[in-house]
Image: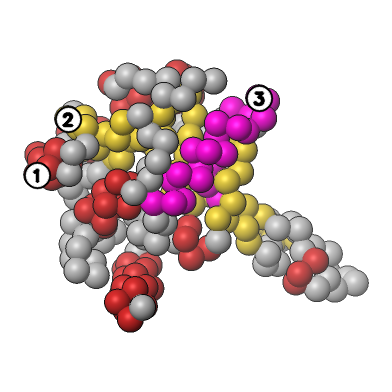
């Protein structure tokens, strides 16, 4: 495996659930610029590229020293499937491997991405991608039947079989596979397990408020040291 890893940061100028989620004020910055600063601290990337249809976002990326991909606005519309987006963006850039990085995980700092690349480069040969995940040990039902526990005898929560949820902090794979699959998920993934706080993804306003509170608390602790 070669070590050429292109970090791709997809950033839309608009958002359906939270208005301008990536650009609205967040702890004295915004999700987009916060992630750029976090990634500047990471090691192992050959290049970092921001993909957006928004000219202002691309200009900011250039000011931070990042590469840019001027995305066709069609691929930022809500009716386009993510499979189309994955294949289109991967086809539009060069590089052996792609690290797909969302800006909506503001509590994942630079060292997380460094560790992800290190694990990707040494993962077993039979694994076809690295997926950032977090572990959930709760009692789950699916279609009326228990998934990871038996109703009797009752299991202790610490003895439950864990489920893994994708966090999209970072997903790593060969660029040619992303084009072919239209996905960042292969058939035999390697799980890069993070804690739930680091993994927290902002989908709704409650997520935004929670993450901003944690981020501000971290800033207070940094200033007090």
Q: Earlier in the sequence, mark 2 or mark 1?
A: 1
Say whether disc 2 or disc 3 marks the residue closer to the N-terminus.
2
| Residue designated by label 2 | 70
Label 3's element? loop
Neighbor class of circle 1 (other Cα within 10 Å; few <14, some 14-19, many 20+) is few
88 over 55 or under it: above or below: above
Residue range highlighted in magenta: 110-133
Could you tell me residue 4's position as x and y percent?
Answer: 41, 24
Residue in view at x 76 percent, y 69 percent: 158
The x and y percentages for residue 157 are: 75, 71
Q: Is residue 201 visible?
A: no
Give x and y (percent) for residue 199: 48, 58
- Which callout, 3 or 1, points at the residue further toward the start of the chain? 1
Describe residue 153's horizontal placement relative to residue 125 as left or right: right
Q: Residues within 10 Å of mark 3 (few under 14, many from 20)?
A: few
Instruction: Tell me the residue that label 1 is attached to.
Output: 56
Q: CA distance from mark 2 to mark 3?
A: 34 Å
Quarter occupied by the N terminus: top right
Instruction: Calculate the distance from the C-alpha at mark 3 to the C-alpha at mark 1.
Output: 41 Å
Element type at marker 1?
Answer: helix
Please tell me whether residue 70 is drawn above or below residue 218 in the rendered image.
above
């Amino acid at each position: 495996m070669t070590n050429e890893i292109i970090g791709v940061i997809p950033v839309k100028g608009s958002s359906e659930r939270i208005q301008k989620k990536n650009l609205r004020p967040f702890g004295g910055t915004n999700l987009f610029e916060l992630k750029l600063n976090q990634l500047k601290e990471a090691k192992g990337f050959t290049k970092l590229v921001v993909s957006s249809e928004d000219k202002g976002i691309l200009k900011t990326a250039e000011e931070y020293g990042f590469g840019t991909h001027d995305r066709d606005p069609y691929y930022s519309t809500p009716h386009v499937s993510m499979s189309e987006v994955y294949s289109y963006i991967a086809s539009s850039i060069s590089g052996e491997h792609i690290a797909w990085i969302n800006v909506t995980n503001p509590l994942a700092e630079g060292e997380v991405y460094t560790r992800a690349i290190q694990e990707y480069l040494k993962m077993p040969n039979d694994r076809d991608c690295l997926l950032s995940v977090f572990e959930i040990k709760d009692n789950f039902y699916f279609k009326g039947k228990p998934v990871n526990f038996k109703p009797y005898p009752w299991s202790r929560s610490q003895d439950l079989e864990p489920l893994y949820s994708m966090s999209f902090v970072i997903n790593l794979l060969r660029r040619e596979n992303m084009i072919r699959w239209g996905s960042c998920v292969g058939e035999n993934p390697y799980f890069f397990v993070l804690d739930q706080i680091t993994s927290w993804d902002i989908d709704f306003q409650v997520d935004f408020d929670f993450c901003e509170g944690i981020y501000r608390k971290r800033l207070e602790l940094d200033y007090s040291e």
